[in-house]
Image (tube, rainbow, N blue to C red):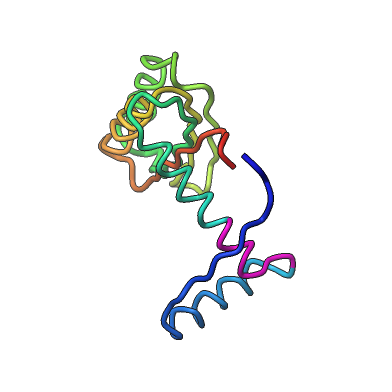
Amino acid sequence: MSNDLMRFSVAMPEDLLVKFDRLVARRGLAKNRSEVIRDLVREALVEDECSIPGRIVMGTLTIVYSHHANDLQEKLHHIQHHYLEVVISSTHVHVDEDNCLEVIIMKGETGDVQDIGNLILGTKGVKTGRLVMTTTGQFI
């Protein structure tokens, strides 16, 4: 596969183009429409790649919880210890007197990473969280 740039045209409503140009401007001086479109295509390809069952992915699960919640830290530690083959590392930050932020880094099959993320997000006392999965992006 060649890395030569190929040109193609895209038609879109003017109001959508105006909003897109604002996005391009927010992404910085080094970005232009073409580069932002390439970024969006790469993001879509990574998301699609991560949805393939059995694919090896990396994931970061970021959660916020109250450290006052009964036995929550023990439950979170138990889950992470149970899945040592997928959970690589975690970082714990004390946000304020009541809240903690934890980032859990995982690597494994898509379904396993999603299941562990859902298990942790569904644990009583976890206030909010988000799982972000990615691949090495061999196609990029």
Q: Which residue lies furthest to the right in this view?
A: 30
Q: Which residue lies furthest to the bottom in this view?
A: 14
Task: Name the residue located 64 percent from the left edge and 61 percent from the top edge.
Answer: 35
- The image quadrant of residue 74 is top left
Image coords of residue 17 (percent x, y): 49, 79
State whether the magenta stretch is mostly helix, strand or loop.
helix
- Above or below 111: residue 4: below
59 in magenta: no
- Above or below 58: residue 95: below
Viewer-side residue, 7 vs 21: 7
Considering the image in quadrants, where does the N terminus appear? top right
Considering the image in quadrants, where does the C terminus appear? top right
Image coords of residue 126 (percent x, y): 33, 41
Viewer-side residue, 68 vs 49: 49
Task: Name the residue located 45 percent from the left edge and 76 percent from the top edge.
Answer: 11
The stretch in magenta equals: 30-38
Q: How many numbered badges does the structure rendering display?
A: 0
Image coords of residue 110 (percent x, y): 37, 29
- Above or below 14: residue 138: above
Task: Name the residue located 43 percent from the left edge and 44 percent from the top edge.
Answer: 47
- The image quadrant of residue 68 is top left
31 in magenta: yes
Image coords of residue 94 (percent x, y): 53, 42
- Using residue 80 as the reference point, say whether residue 29 is left or right of it: right
Viewer-side residue, 120 vs 50: 50
Task: Name the residue located 74 percent from the left edge and 65 percent from the top edge.
Answer: 30
